[in-house]
């Protein structure tokens, strides 16, 4: 039961962060574009997108099933779950009206690919280096305590 509570807390926090951030971005883009109108229906669709993204995040990164699989697999599962729904929601929200323009599709593809490879880059070159450093320090500490 405690695990379910923890997952629900993670879901709530992810949803609150992503929704508030996207509502703020929506208002800024709307005002900057000269359109001062944001409809309730658009905000509900945005909430649904954020809820699905939060669920995908919690499932991919916080459940016992996925924790032992490794970051790259977690990230891949997240993108495979989220991106198709994101594209569908973009259509429903009117961002990709009709078939969308090639520029919109290229922009979406570039954003997804850049985020994916940036996360893999950080995992490989930063986090693994820190993990090795932490392991070495822990081994030194254990060796010192074993002599005492």
Image (spheres, rainbow, N blue to C red):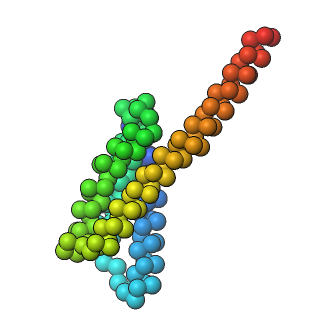
Extreme-right residue of the structure:
148
Residue 105: x, y in percent?
30, 67
Residue 12: x, y in percent?
42, 51
Residue 135: x, y in percent?
64, 27
Q: Is residue 30 above or below residue 60?
A: below
Q: Is residue 88 above or below residue 28?
A: above
Figure quadrant of the N terminus: top left
Residue at (37, 86) in percent of width and height: 35
Q: Is residue 148 above or below residue 49?
A: above
Residue at (44, 46) in percent of width and height: 10
- Residue 134 in view in this figure: yes
For the residue pair 4 and 119, the one nearer the viewer reads as 119
Left or right of 111 on screen, residue 90:
left
Left or right of 133 on screen, residue 64:
left
Figure quadrant of residue 63:
top left
Left or right of 63 on screen, residue 121:
right
Extreme-bottom residue of the structure:
34
Residue at (23, 75) in percent of width and height: 97
Figure quadrant of residue 92:
bottom left
Figure quadrant of residue 128:
top right
Residue at (35, 50) in percent of width and height: 79
- Residue 5 in view in this figure: no
Count all numbered tags in the image, as a single digit.
Answer: 0
For the residue pair 54 and 75, the one nearer the viewer reads as 75
Residue 45: x, y in percent?
28, 66
For the residue pair 40 and 27, the one nearer the viewer reads as 27
Figure quadrant of the C terminus: top right
């Amino acid at each position: 039961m405690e695990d379910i509570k923890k997952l629900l807390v993670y879901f709530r926090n992810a949803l609150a962060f992503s929704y508030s951030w996207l509502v703020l971005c929506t208002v800024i883009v709307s005002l900057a574009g000269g359109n001062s109108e944001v409809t309730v229906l658009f905000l509900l669709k945005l909430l649904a997108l954020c809820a699905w993204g939060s669920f995908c995040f919690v499932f991919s990164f916080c459940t016992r099933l996925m924790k032992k699989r490794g970051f790259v697999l977690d990230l891949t599962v997240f993108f495979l779950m989220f991106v198709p729904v994101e594209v569908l929601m973009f259509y429903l929200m009117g961002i990709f009206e009709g078939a969308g323009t090639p520029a919109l599709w290229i922009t979406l593809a570039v954003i997804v690919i850049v985020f994916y490879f940036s996360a893999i880059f950080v995992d490989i070159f930063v986090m693994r280096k820190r993990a090795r450093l932490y392991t070495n320090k822990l081994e030194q500490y254990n060796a010192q305590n074993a002599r005492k």
